[in-house]
Image: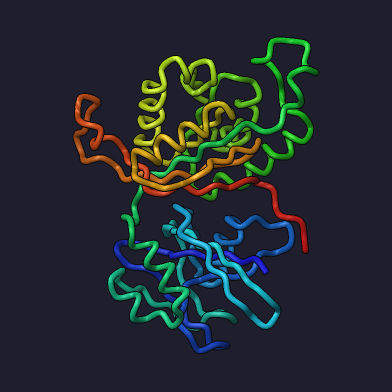
């Protein structure tokens, strides 16, 4: 059984809900609906249980335990309140806003306390960037024209539609892409829904990245440090090196860095001190504190 939930926060406090059915205090969570992705379920469950609309942040952890129906896994995200108000409902009869450092004493279950520990391991208000590999575009050998112009296949358009639905859950406000038709097409729907253009990033294409990796990484960090949450579409020859290099610089142990077509890396950065500049030491740049791989934006098939 798959489920999703969140640590819902605002102004130094997080939401803890009381479920009369179990007489416990817990973090909001619930089962995935058929045809629903994990991030979408997290946002929906937060809304249904708390009345608050949420903007997702970093992935915190996955917990697993046994229930009467069998094994259950729950993916938790950090989630910032954007709007709403609590009203008692069938599942939750009370909600408390608890200061971060007092929440462990309110939560009933050790699993929730482990999620809280992951949440408290980094600042709540991080910078996020969604790094997307372009969707499927058929085989290069079957495309007679310039490879830069190779468009998405029908399967790729389905993946792009999934990304168009999923990526806004993080409150994206800017869209960037390597200048390849298949990269731009992968995220154009997101840009259209925002009413913005797709900013082309030559350094984040395979041809632009490898001649000067440092300059390309600097460009990505500049994008991450801008206002709002950006989406960046790039290629399979770039993304694994970007993620592994940023992880090494941030002291994260990631191991292998997968990069399927249509997948997303959710990257969370600690922002630099105000007034930083490129002439400062490397510690002045945004530092990666979390990296979570989303292999698909399409819902898992029913099981």
Quadrant of the image occupied by residue 90: bottom right
Q: Quadrant of the C terminus?
A: bottom right
Furthest-front residue in this view: 255
Q: What's the residue at 71%, 55% (across, down)?
A: 300
Q: Nearer the viewer, residue 251 or 92?
A: 251
Q: What's the residue at 62%, 31% (across, down)?
A: 134
Disc count in the image? 0
Q: Tell me if residue 277 comes above or below residue 296 in the rendering.
A: above
Residue 50 on image: x %, y %: 50, 71
Side of 128 where 19 appears, left or right: right
Quadrant of the image occupied by residue 3: bottom right
Residue 34 on image: x %, y %: 74, 62
What colouring does the structure picture have?
Answer: rainbow
Residue 221 on image: x %, y %: 37, 32
Side of 193 where 273 appears, left or right: left
Residue 227 on image: x %, y %: 37, 37
């Amino acid at each position: 059984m798959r489920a999703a939930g969140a640590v819902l926060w605002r102004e130094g406090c997080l939401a803890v809900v009381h479920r009369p059915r179990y007489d416990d205090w817990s973090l909001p969570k619930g089962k995935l609906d058929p045809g629903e992705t994990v991030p979408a379920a997290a946002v929906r469950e937060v809304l249904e249980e708390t009345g608050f609309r949420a903007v997702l942040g970093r992935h915190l952890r996955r917990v697993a335990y046994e229930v009467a129906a069998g094994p259950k896994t729950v993916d938790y995200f950090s989630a910032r309140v954007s709007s709403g108000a609590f009203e008692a409902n069938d599942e939750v009869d009370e909600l408390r806003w608890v200061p971060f450092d007092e929440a462990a004493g309110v939560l009933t279950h050790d699993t929730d306390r482990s999620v809280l520990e992951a949440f408290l391991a980094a600042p709540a208000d991080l910078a996020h960037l969604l790094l997307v590999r372009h969707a499927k575009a058929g085989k290069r050998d079957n495309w007679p024209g310039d490879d830069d112009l190779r468009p998405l296949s029908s399967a790729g358009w389905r993946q792009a539609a999934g990304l168009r639905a999923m990526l806004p859950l993080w409150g994206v406000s800017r869209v960037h892409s390597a200048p390849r038709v298949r990269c731009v097409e992968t995220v154009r729907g997101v840009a259209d829904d925002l009413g913005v253009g797709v900013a082309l990033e030559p350094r984040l294409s395979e041809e632009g990245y490898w001649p000067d990796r440092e300059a390309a990484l600097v460009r990505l960090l500049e994008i991450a440090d801008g206002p709002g949450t950006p989406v960046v579409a790039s290629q399979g020859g770039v993304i694994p090196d970007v993620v592994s290099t940023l992880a090494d610089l941030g002291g994260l142990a990631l191991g292998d860095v997968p990069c399927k077509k249509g997948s997303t890396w959710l990257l969370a950065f600690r922002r630099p001190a105000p007034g930083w500049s490129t002439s400062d030491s490397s510690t002045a740049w945004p530092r990666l504190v979390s990296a979570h791989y989303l292999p698909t934006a399409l819902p898992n098939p029913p099981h």
